[in-house]
Amino acid sequence: MLLRFLMAGLTASSLAKTATAGRAASSSLSSTVSATSSKILYVVRHGQAVHNPRAEAAKENNCSTEEFFRLMREDDALDADLTDLGKEQANRCYEAHFSSSASSSSSSNNRNKNNPLGIDLVVASCLSRTMDTADLVFPHYENDDTKDAAPRRISIDNFREVNGNLLNGKRRTKSELLARHPNWNFDSLLTEHDESWTPEMEEFEAAAERGYRGLVDLLTGGSYNDGGNSASMNTFLLVCHGGILRYMMNIHPLVHLCDERTDTNNPNEKSEQQRTQKTVESRFENCELRKYRLSWKDDNYEGNDNDNPVRRAVVLTQVDH
């Protein structure tokens, strides 16, 4: 079943679009696969961008897929920027989870007030709206204390939005990104220009595969182990896109979702948050934060795949935050 999925999803055109990301991730899939420790992963979808307002409003009113993409094409923009509302959404997320008030209510009194969730690494896609959102949600800070040094910020191409067709999914040149986002590392981008973007839209299965590779990278340290001890990095903030999150989490056979959020059997005893909380499969809203435990799943798939033994299933277990 797994091989049939990959053959269906990674057609020649899809492979052409994801060649760069695939090369960047291949080393992590073939090394350190014995890593067993789980990671804490906070996931945030970027704030509203200029291509979102009309299309998202239409989607809320159950428009057709064709209408949704028509509106996005009409409002399309290269590497689309955040709107004022998108920046406001990011600031609200900051106040709720990363501000000094959030720090004072943290369960740990030993945490840096600038880093109340204990983030070890910040990850975003190669598209500016995710990095801009990350910098608003969890601002970069200067600290001379090595113990409380600001976590690194890296761009991982595998977490970009569904690629192709729309200009909002096409990245700026590497030089432009370096100038615009000086606190970010772009070593995962192997070319100056976005050579993976094409006029044809990437197949959803191929996008899901990229997302899976990105999760494997986070577990193995493939994208952030620069000679240091990747095992010491246990808590990540990932800011990416609604499309890649949806397909990575909901259609890839090696990505499993679980739910360990607090609940009770008696509806009358549930809190308001518990009564209204979404399912683990539900769509991310702009700047919505969810907390997961990311780990390997031992019984990853039926049968033996001796030709590709390193492909292991991963589990995203949503937990309270």
Image (cartoon, helix red, strand yellow):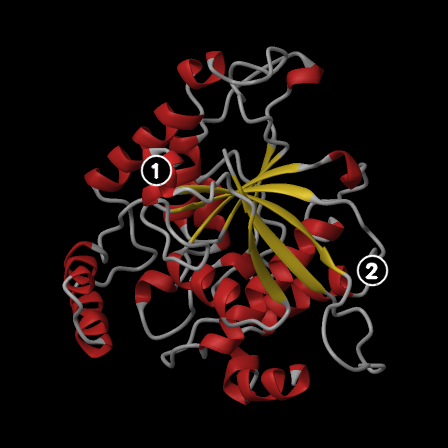
Task: Identify the residue shown where x is 21% and y is 58%.
Answer: 56
Residue 195 visible in this rendered orientation of the protein: no
Left or right: where 157 falls relative to 197:
right
Amino acid identity at mark 2: Ser
x then y, percent, for residue 83 = 22, 44
Task: Identify the residue shown where x is 45% and y is 79%.
Answer: 203
Mark before the other along the chain sequence, 1 or 2: 2
Q: Secondary structure at mark 1?
A: helix
| In this rendering, the label closer to the viewer, 1 or 2 | 1
x then y, percent, for residue 147 = 70, 16
Residue 201, quarter of picture: bottom left
Marks 1 and 2, Cα distance to the nearest angstrom? Answer: 49 Å
User: Relative to 77, is 225 above or below?
Assistant: above
Residue that numbered label 2 is attached to: 31
Task: Identify the residue shown where x is 26% and y is 41%.
Answer: 86
x then y, percent, for residue 160 = 47, 59
**Quadrant holding the N terminus:** bottom right
Crowding around mark 2 (Cα neighbors within 10 Å: few <14, some 14 to 19, many 20+) is some
Residue 313, quarter of picture: bottom right
User: Relative to 297, is 35 above or below?
Assistant: above
Task: Identify the residue shown where x is 75% and y is 64%.
Answer: 29
Residue that numbered label 1 is attached to: 268
User: Relative to 199, is 98 above or below?
Assistant: above
Residue 130 visible in this rendered orientation of the protein: yes
Which numbered disc covers residue 132? none
Residue nearest the viewer, comparing 214 with 297: 297
x then y, percent, for residue 243 = 40, 63
